[in-house]
Amino acid sequence: MMELPIDQVQEGSSSQKKMGRGKIEIKRIENTTNRQVTFCKRRNGLLKKAYELSVLCDAEVALIVFSSRGRLYEYANNSVRGTIDRYKKACAASSNTESVSEANTQFYQQEASKLRRQIRDIQNLNRHILGEALGNLSLKELKNLEGRLEKGLSRVRSRKHETLFADVEFMKKREIELQNHNNYLRAKIAEHERAQQQQQQQQQQQQNLMLSESLPSQSYDRNFFPANLLGSDNQYSRQDQTALQLV
């Protein structure tokens, strides 16, 4: 690697320190010197982190870095080629159905444990709302529970009042409808009674008319007497005449 002047290295390091203190924008460094200094520092840090990871966690690590000039830097606690072969085998095995089923099984197990935890939390919350299992709650948790209960109670009361008002309005409307229907039925009944009375009067008039047509006429003249009456008078007149003759 080509050597840099001391003043340029110090300037690059000072600029990097200034950049490190603030928020660094991740983009390509245009200045060649600064870019080379940054590469050296971050490459060494990356190699150090790879070594620490392999030692502390007993992991197999392989690191390959090519600089902008094409130089190769690598680190492996086993061997780079062996690690690459193992990576290829792992990628091939991951495409098999067994690995997929294992991943699915692990995913469903995580989801099941998450759901069980949520169910347990909801059950505990329900017990707390009912006033049970409050011994393990702190003062802050009790205050939060009290505020939640008061809010829920106010919402329940508000909903109850709305329901009562709606029921009262419905009953008022229902009362008006029933009253109108009752008036309508009364009017229909009165109309029906009037129709029956008119029908009875018509029937009575027809019966009277039929009776008047069946009886003989009783209109007589003042100087005219029925024959039967004259006949009876004739009998009395004959008796009178005979009596007169005897005398």
Image (cartoon, grey):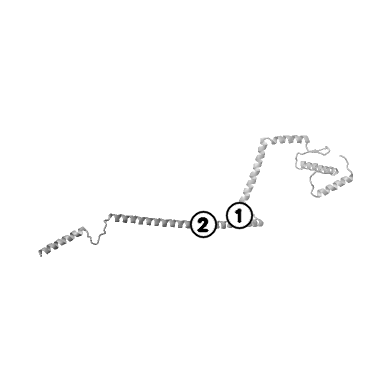
Number of callouts in the render? 2
Q: Is residue 158 found left or right of 9 in the rendered image?
A: left
Q: Amino acid at mark 2?
A: Lys
User: How far apart, in angstroms, are the residues tagged by discs 1 and 2?
Assistant: 39 Å
For image coordinates 16% across by 62% down, the residue present is 237
Residue 53 shows in the view: yes
Extreme bottom residue here?
A: 247
Q: Quadrant of the C terminus?
A: bottom left
* Mark 2: secondary structure: helix
Is 92 rendered above or below residue 213? above
The earlier-in-sequence mark between 1 and 2 is: 1
For image coordinates 35% across by 55% down, the residue present is 202
Q: Which residue is mark 1?
A: 129
Residue 79 shows in the view: no
Q: Amino acid at mark 1?
A: Ile
Horizontal and vertical percent position of residue 239 = 14, 62
| Residue 27 lies in quadrant | top right
| Residue 97 lies in quadrant | top right
Front label number (1 vs 2)? 2
